[in-house]
Amino acid sequence: MKFGISTFITDQSIRPAPLGRALEERGFDSLFIAEHSHIPVSRQSPYPGGGELPDIYYRTLDPFVALAAVATVTERLLVGTGIALVAQRDPIHTAKEVASLDLISGGRAVFGIGVGWNREEMANHGTDPAVRGRLANERLRAMIELWTKEKAEFHGEFVDFDPVFAWPKPVQQPHPPIYVGGGQGAFPRVVELGDAWLANSLPPKVLGQRIEELRTLAGRDVPVTVYAVPDDLEALEAYARLGVERVQFYLPSDPEPAALAHLDRFAELVGRFN
């Protein structure tokens, strides 16, 4: 089982480059960072975590800019979005950003995606929350065409363009792996368009049941990465028994000294696991 870090990189947290170097020095295999373009001041969408929405949600850096900075100071670390909100993103621009990150990193990009929960945020991007799932799927299909075809074209319900040239193409073939975030409702998206399931902080007992459901639906084993796992040895051992490919500790969005102390604690736990 591999060990990575998930976090919100903000204007108040450890900067991307020092974070990337610190992760690679400590042997972590990946960094996945969250995305929110903004948060409307007035909203009806409840925060999934309960209570007040933390300010990290509206202080996040652009994920592709931050990950490019990480990529330039690391050699082995996977650099991924966890998650990019494709229902709020132009697919042509996003395809170029993902491919550019893959090129800059030498083939280390991971495209973690999701449909999002904040309806007011979506609406400000012109996205109808009622169709966000269909929209996300179609944009992913269009991006795959842009990555894999010399003359890409797409004609769908939401995305429509005649043949275009779009470079760079990704280093990874046929394209960077797509890690689909979400619960059971995302399983059809995982099966059709994903290379892995990005599960959000599910305890091992529940996760085991969901993996069986996904495996039955897909008719194959699907790699699983678990976001924001407990920093607990017993839980890590339980994830390993389930055959989880990767777990990610959640790093609070702290300034550098505190962030490094958290990473040291995570690394010590991984050392005990190994």
Image (cartoon, grey):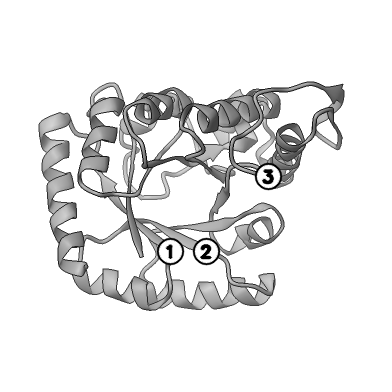
| Picture coordinates of residue 13, whole percent (x, y) | 23, 28
Q: Earlier in the sequence, mark 1 or mark 2?
A: 2
Mark 3 highlights which residue? Answer: 174
Find residue 269 and report its image quarter. Answer: bottom left
> N-terminal of the two: label 1 or label 3?
3
Q: Quadrant of the C terminus?
A: bottom left
| Residue type for callout 3 | Pro
Q: Secondary structure at mark 3?
A: loop
* Near-viewer residue (17 or 193): 17
Q: Compared to 67, does 46 lie above or below? A: below
Residue at (40, 65) in percent of width and height: 202
* Residue sitting at x 52%, y 37%: 84
Compared with 38, 119 (above or below) is below
Between the residue at mark 1 and the residue at mark 3, the CA separation in whole angstroms equals 21 Å
- Residue type at the position of mark 1: Glu
Please say if 236 is above or below 34: below
Q: Which residue is mark 2?
A: 223
Element under disc 2: loop
Query: What amino acid is at disc 2?
Result: Pro
**Relative to 152, 233 lies left or right:** left
The numbered dot on residue 245 is 1
Image x and y of residue 23, in percent: 25, 41
Label 1, label 2: how many angstroms apart (C-alpha)? Answer: 6 Å
Q: Secondary structure at mark 1?
A: loop
Q: Are marks 1 and 2 in contact (CB under 8 Å)?
A: yes
Between disc 3 and disc 2, the foreground one is 3
